[in-house]
Image (spheres, grey):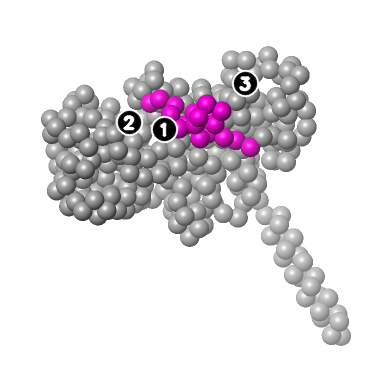
Amino acid sequence: MKKSIISAALGVAALGLAATGASAGTLDDVKAKGFVQCGVSQGLAGFSNPDAQGNWTGMDVDVCRGLSAAIFGDATKVKFTPLSAKERFTALQSGEVDVLSRNTTWTATRDTSLGLNFAGVNYYDGQGFMVRKSLGIKTALELSGASVCTNTGTTTELNVADYFRANKMEYELVAFEKADEVVAAYDAGRCDIFTTDQSGLYAQRTKLTNPDDHMVLPEIISKEPLGPVVRQGDDQWFNLVKWTHFAMVNAEELGVSSKNVGEMMGSDNPAIKRFLGTEGAFGEALGVGNDWAANIIKHVGNYSEVFERAVGPDTPLAIARGVNDLWSRGGLQYAPPIR
């Protein structure tokens, strides 16, 4: 009798484990509903910004478009949820969005205590300061006693506190939840300084009444590695988001672009053959077709194309590649190989 009770208990446990293992993950949910729900900013030029027709563009947007291309062979199967800095993590944790791709800094706290995983760095950034040229300020070390506008719920508040304390300077913090509120307050003269990631300063400067009256100071006071974020506990989805970014970086290094991807399908280069899915079965391991990377590049482009289109020298932001160049050209962008 005792043996049969134990056997029955083990059987129930096994059924429970089987049910848990069979439950749909994020990729299955995305395939079932037919689109990726992507959490983005409320409007940051170059990263995630809607036009008058509601069409979103930018580097963070292209991560989600790349995911859509990898899964569906179509970069348009994405819905975007604008999120403030304060609400972004809750939206991801609750399942309101499938992925957060919203100029979000990878930190130890966020990577451990929030139940989240960062899936790579699609933009290496650092916090800076913007001031009015009329103030005559040339360096951040001249900012003692200034009032500082920034967002709540971001790493910028702690970075500012650390910087001013380390340099024995006083300051007054003026914080707002929404990015546009920060821009409006600074533009109206409610504070002396606007601080956020340097890329954000260049983007937000374009919204000011007289952009040319303002300058970004040279100092970078922090490391801000920005990238897409997913919930912990779903390795398949984590891998797919991670390799979507890696695919764009690898494509640039291999010389594969949206313009030549069709021609490259006939390449004899083993690395390109694996990348484009004409050899091997790497897509199957990610839960998508073997042409997943080819579809990302065909519909979205490689990392260089994404960067130049969104924030490069020919855009209003006019940002140089700098540390976001490939490792082979002195930058930090480096992706593991597909093999």
Say if 36 sits above or below 259 in the image.
below
* Secondary structure category for the residue under label 1: loop
For the point 36% across and 50% down, which residue is it? 155
- Decide whether residue 22 is among the magenta residues: no
Q: Position of residue 95 (x, y in %)?
A: 51, 51
For the point 62% across and 51% down, which residue is it? 234
Q: Position of residue 3 (x, y in %)?
A: 86, 82
Quarter placement of the C terminus? top right
- Residue in front for this viewpoint, 104 or 48: 104
Mark 2 sits on what residue? 203
Callout 1 amino acid:
Phe
Q: CA distance from mark 3 to mark 2?
A: 29 Å
Dot 1 or dot 2, earlier in sequence: 1
The mark closer to the camera, 3 or 2, is 3
Q: CA distance from mark 1 to mark 2?
A: 9 Å
- Residue in front for this viewpoint, 241 or 109: 109
Q: Is residue 61 visible?
A: no
For the point 19% across and 51% down, which residue is it? 169
* Secondary structure category for the residue under label 2: helix
Quarter placement of the N terminus? bottom right
Q: Residues within 10 Å of mark 1 (few under 14, many from 20)?
A: many
Instruction: Answer with left or right where residue 282 lies relative to residue 296.
Output: right
Mark 3 sits on what residue? 256
Q: Residues within 10 Å of mark 3 (few under 14, many from 20)?
A: many
Mark 1 sits on what residue? 47
